[in-house]
Image (tube, rainbow, N blue to C red):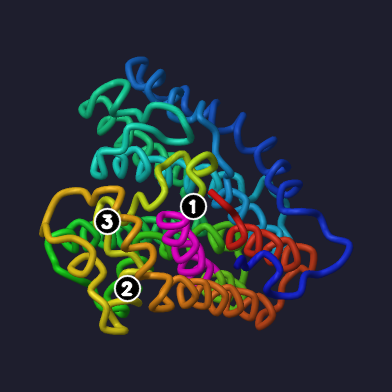
């Protein structure tokens, strides 16, 4: 069951991969150039992280949001760079927190260089994001920087809630959604609107794009949580059921809890430590039998629909509106 064809798609449009390829062609050289500002000791660490590649969805949203306000890519470029630097700072730190040794099939920064250099590299990327935005302190750039700072704070709060949840027996669905809105939705909402802010768009456009990003963030995280349980290891680069193995309080787990199923209590006798392969398999069966898999997909589809509706409810350039819809469908239909 996938969401790739869940909602009708406009005809005669660029594919998501074509749009993302266009983004990469503009953003990757600019990221490399901006990274040269970092200290000589930090540059190779950052280069290793970026060498593994990425989809650049957030940078793409930043550029498209500028287009939505009838501005060209160059107007949104500094916002795209700032978003990407903040996003990658969070990835480097997340890998330390989670103890992940591989990302995109390559060693994570901390696994290759150590925790100290990884922390410093992440900090450097975060600082560089705001340096870029505030080099020319126009009203638009200052407002964009403030919105990005707010998004970073929300992301950090969401991550803190995630860490705290490791010591809780369960999370309610509402608590899980609130946590994931911070972890993922806040930065996506900023990415989806920062280009329009830089272009001086009116509040109706900026707010609609931000709402689109909020809903897309929840749909994105629901999809990510699905992949954490049912993803194909050869594609995701992680073992099947990896989130279950680590006892993460993801949406499928919270949905099961809301139905009266304590997945971890019912599949393992231990109260801490990683689940065994047999326990992971039993947990997956229970999630499927209680309908948590289907309802996670359903939630992702509902949030995708809300994201697309937000695009329809504000005046913006039609080409950008169409391409934002294409990217949203791609994000929800992805397999890694």
Q: Which residues are magenta?
A: 213-230
Q: CA distance from mark 1 to mark 2?
A: 24 Å
Residue 65 is covered by the magenta coloring: no
Seen in the picture, residue 160 relative to 168 is either above or below; the reply is: above
Q: Secondary structure at mark 1?
A: loop
Q: Residue at x 61, y 66 (%)?
A: 2
Which is nearer the eye, 173 or 50? 173
Quick one: label 1 or label 2, which is nearer the N terminus?
2
Q: Residue 175, percent across and down?
A: 27, 75
On the image, numbered disc 3 is attached to which residue?
Answer: 279
CA neighbours of label 2 inside 10 A, class few (<14), some (14 to 19), many (20+): some
Pointer 1 with pointer 2, Cβ within 8 A: no
Q: Residues within 10 Å of mark 1 (few under 14, many from 20)?
A: many
Rendered-image quadrant of the N terminus: bottom right
- Closer to the camera: disc 2 or disc 3? 3
Helix, strand or loop under label 2: helix
């Amino acid at each position: 069951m996938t969401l790739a064809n869940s909602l009708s798609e406009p005809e005669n449009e660029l594919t998501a991969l074509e749009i993302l390829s266009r983004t990469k062609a503009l953003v990757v050289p600019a990221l490399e150039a901006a990274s040269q500002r970092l200290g000589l000791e930090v540059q190779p660490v950052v280069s290793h992280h970026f060498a593994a590649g990425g989809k650049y969805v957030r940078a793409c949203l930043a550029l498209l949001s500028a287009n939505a306000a009838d501005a060209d890519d160059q107007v949104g470029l500094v916002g795209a760079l700032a978003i990407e630097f903040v996003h990658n700072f969070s990835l480097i730190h997340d890998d330390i927190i989670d103890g992940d040794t591989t990302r995109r099939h390559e060693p994570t920064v901390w696994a290759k260089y150590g925790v100290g250099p990884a922390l410093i590299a992440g900090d450097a990327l975060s600082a560089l994001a705001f340096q870029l935005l505030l080099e020319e302190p126009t009203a638009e750039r200052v407002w964009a920087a403030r919105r990005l700072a707010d998004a970073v704070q929300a992301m950090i709060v969401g991550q803190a809630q995630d860490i705290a949840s490791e010591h809780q027996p369960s999370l309610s669905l509402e608590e899980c959604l609130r946590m994931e809105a911070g972890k993922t939705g806040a930065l996506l909402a900023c990415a989806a609107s920062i280009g329009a802010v830089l272009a001086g768009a009116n509040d109706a456009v900026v707010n609609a794009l931000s709402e689109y990003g909020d809903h897309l963030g929840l749909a994105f995280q629901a999809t990510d949580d699905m992949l954490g349980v049912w993803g194909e290891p050869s594609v995701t680069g992680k073992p099947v059921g990896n989130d279950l193995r680590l006892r993460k309080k993801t949406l499928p787990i919270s949905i099961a809890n809301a139905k009266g199923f304590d997945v971890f209590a019912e599949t393992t006798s231990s109260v801490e430590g990683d689940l065994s392969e047999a326990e992971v398999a039993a947990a997956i069966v229970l999630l499927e039998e209680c309908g948590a898999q289907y309802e996670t997909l359903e939630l992702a589809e509902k949030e995708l629909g809300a994201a697309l509706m937000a695009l329809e409810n504000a005046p913006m350039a039609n080409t950008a509106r169409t391409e934002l819809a294409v990217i949203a469908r791609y994000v929800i239909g992805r397999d890694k």
